[in-house]
Amino acid sequence: MLTRGFHLADNTQTEFKPPKGVSLWQDGFRRLFRRPIAVICFAVIIFYFALAAFIYLAEIFHWQIGFTLWSQATGPSYQPPCRENIFGTDIFGFSVFRRMLYGAKTSITVALCASIISIGIGVPLGAVAGYFRGIVDEIIVWAYSTLSSIPYILLIMAFAVVLHDKTIAGFKLSGITSVYLAIGLTSWVDLCRLIRGETIKHKEREYILAAQSYGCTNSRIIFKHLLPNVFHIVIIIFSLQFVSFIHAEIILSFLGLGEADKPSWGAMINDARIELARGVWWQMVAATVAVFVISLALNVFGDALRDSLDPKLRVR
Amino acid sequence: MNTDANTNGFLLKVDDLKTYFPVRKGLLRRTVGYLKAVDGISLAVKPATSFGLVGESGCGKTTAARSILRLIPVTSGKIIFDNIDILAANSARMRDIRASITLVFQDPFGSLNPRMTVANIVGEPLKIHKKITGSELTEQVRLILSKVGLSADAINRYPHEFSGGQRQRIGIARALILKPKLVICDEPVSALDVSIQSQILNLLKDLQQEFSLTYLFIAHDLAVVQFSCDIVAVMYMGRIVEQAPVSELYNNPLHPYTVALMAAIPKITVSPQASTHRLKGEIPSILSPPPGCPFNPRCRFAGENCFSQNPLLVPVAGNDEHLIACWHIKK
Amino acid sequence: MPEIDTLLSVENLSTHFFTQQGVVRAVQDVSFSVKKSRTFAVVGESGCGKSITALSIMRLVPEPQGKIVAGKINFGGRNLLDLSKKRMRAIRGNRIAMIFQEPMTSLNPVFTVGYQIEEAIRLHQHKSKSDARDLAIQALQQVRISDPKQRIKEYPHQMSGGMRQRVMIAMAISCKPELLIADEPTTALDVTIQAQILDLLDQLQKQSQMSVLLITHNLGIVAERAQDVAVMYASRIAELSDCKSLFDNPLHPYTQGLLKSLPRLGFTGKRLYTIPGIVPEPLRFPAGCKFHPRCPVGCNDKRCQTVEPQLRSLDNGRAVACWFAPGYERPDNPK
């Protein structure tokens, strides 16, 4: 007599396992990975991350595997691409290919750390501003409006210069740390704005009112009710912002504010400035190709994420 | 279960409740006027009864309900619930009160958090107030779900996996899990399909009997209110214009607005008199209500007094329980 | 029904939606006729397919997911489904007009009300700007909006819900259509405004002899305003009848259950009759008769469980899709 499976109760429960439901997250990710392009891009992204992780571990544990040894001369200086060195060598005879791989580790590390900082600041501030409105909102909006009115490059440079080689609480800030601190501390504004906007919209929903009506505290409402419903934005923004963080790192390294001694794509492009005059193009190409592929993958994936995770776009 | 009551015998007593929203204009955000959403209503609800609040959109019934729970700041008035002055309660007291007065919402789609399982949605009030967790919580959730007609299969599922009627049952379960004394039902069936409405209305009645609940029932459908309530108050532009026990109101409606409202409801047995009671005009903007009785622009009987003075809600001669706010009905 | 009287006749219309989760058969094998100068109501609950039926007649079904897969829609001697897109556009808004449930989202918020009415007029009647303006003012007068010269300069958000719906009606009738399709025109309005709008539609209908196809879920509106009615359930027509006979003597168990379960003014019982179960999801329609799981007579009947009943015409001009219908002994009259 029933069409939906569970309906009018029969109180004959003894020992049973209630079936697990399909959450909106699961539904979204299922739909995401049904699209071949999303799967391909995801594979590319995972590959880069895995590479970065591997190189990171290799560095810590001093593993001596071929392609991680970027500081080993593999050929004569400025050797063009050939069979031994796919992307040729740089001025020291180091394999450009190996430098390119190491650059992945640099970029991913920077972008990841910057993302964490940016999310850690932007999301709580946005949620608090959107939920409480009033004076709290005014202060936070004023803060980020001021910050975002300063040209991005100047801001990053200022942070990077100030933090460069400084020691905070006994912790020495190496070149790369200053880079991702600079990027993270200046990039939380967009996320904050979006989270604030979504929070303002969601605040009016009846389930928030319901939570208030049975005595939920404000902090519980923000963290248990609101944030899970706006978090899909964080994921989407994370993937799209990742690209701009990689680009930001490149620019900073290009300007000489990054890590001086370790390879990075920005540094490679910086070197390539002089090298191009001598007809040495392979470092430029290597770095550019590496950046392009990950940027494309992240952009396409980010769009696919948005299409799949936005609950309003579900076909119901 | 519901033995506590005010010394007057009322569980909830509202006196001259006013909820005004300031209207701010200009660069300096100066207050230029007030949106009088609720403009002085008084009502008294006896325990284990159903009090219905009926009116069209903008009449203030939903604002009144939310004001009683202090979900909206109240401008003036008194609200006594179970001998406690709600408006004077501090936040700790208010939290306790929120365990005794719960809300059932209109929109079964929007009133449940889409990212939480049914177990979490229904069980959260228990977590907050009684600090119950784990298997004991699950047991209580299962129990209340079975009372509202849902099988325990539902507990790990998400709201979007249910139909509108089932979601409304989840909402009702959430409202009842703390065994409240007063349940405010804000248009509980308006958003449901016709064939499901009767299921939910029956359910609400059954639950009221089983748990000795008191309902404050808000609706715009007079037929629903007639079935579900004992006393009905008709609201218009923030005021109560008529109030009476259900059978009295339906057999003997006196206020012109009530009469017009009843006539406007499309009925299956068509009464030939219907079109003569048609109301003209729109509901005036609540920002600039007409002086005197708020109904005067649309009232057939509007006389001199009606344009200058707001009529008070007084008992009709010969029947203390039938109240009316109208200069015209002065018998 | 003699052919002369029929304005629109729908024959075996089927509209399907092709989604990732499967084929949603939103409208299946629907047939009915709308006579001239009469109001025909299509009544049913959410998901029954009544709105999609209306959109199919206007050929406004969202593509590419939606597609009219079968059937004929005969209007003015032609099958609307055979017409080119250009010809259909000439009919839409001109000879067949439609008004919707939500006036706020159906009107463009960035244009004045006058502009939108004039646009509709100029599209179909090739009038000059000033002529169109006069016609627009006339149209607003016809729908009883006071001070129309001032109103045409206003924007939708400056008007109340009832007023916006009147504007929509003005737009719809500005080209004097032969058929007006009204999809839940008063659901979003208050009861007293609803009564005004329905009265207005009655008057306009009498003035211009146009037919109205009224889509609603409110049986009371059907009883008061329509002459003929089709009751839809889960993408099919359950019962087709003139209104008086339907309410006096409903034949389909779904109609009977619906009428019995409605809370009515004057009802003094302690419990309402309920139709058990829930409305089935389009992707999970039961086999056989779609209503059988909830049907007091058919839930245990083998034929109802396996074979879908077709809409069968009876002698008195009515039609029912139920294995038990002709000669079925129904329980008490739902009054």
Image (cartoon, coloured by chain):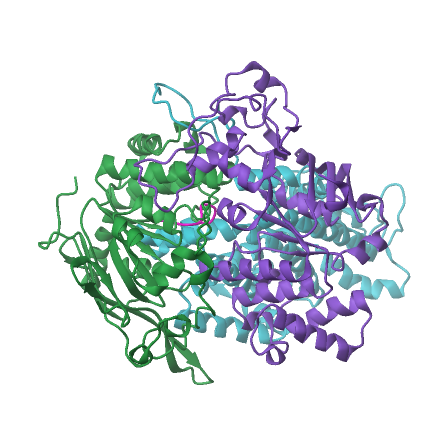
- Residue C72: x percent and y percent? 78, 39
Quadrant location of the C terminus of chain B in the rendered image: bottom left
**Residue C59 horizontal/vertical position (percent):** 75, 48
Q: Tell me if B214 is positioned left or right of A245 in this view.
A: left
Chain C drawn colour: purple
Residue C303 location, x and y as percent?
A: 59, 16
What percent of the width, then of the height, locates residue A241?
Answer: 63, 57
Q: Is residue C285 above or below residue B67?
A: above
Q: Is residue A21 visible?
A: no
Chain depicted in cyan: A
Q: Give the residue drawn at x 70%, y 68%.
A: A255
Location of residue B62 with respect to A145 vertically, above or below: above
Q: Colour of chain B?
A: green
The part of the chain drawn in magenta is B104-110
User: Residue C73: within the magenta?
Assistant: no
Nearer to me, C253 or A101: C253
Residue A149, quarter of the rendered image: bottom right
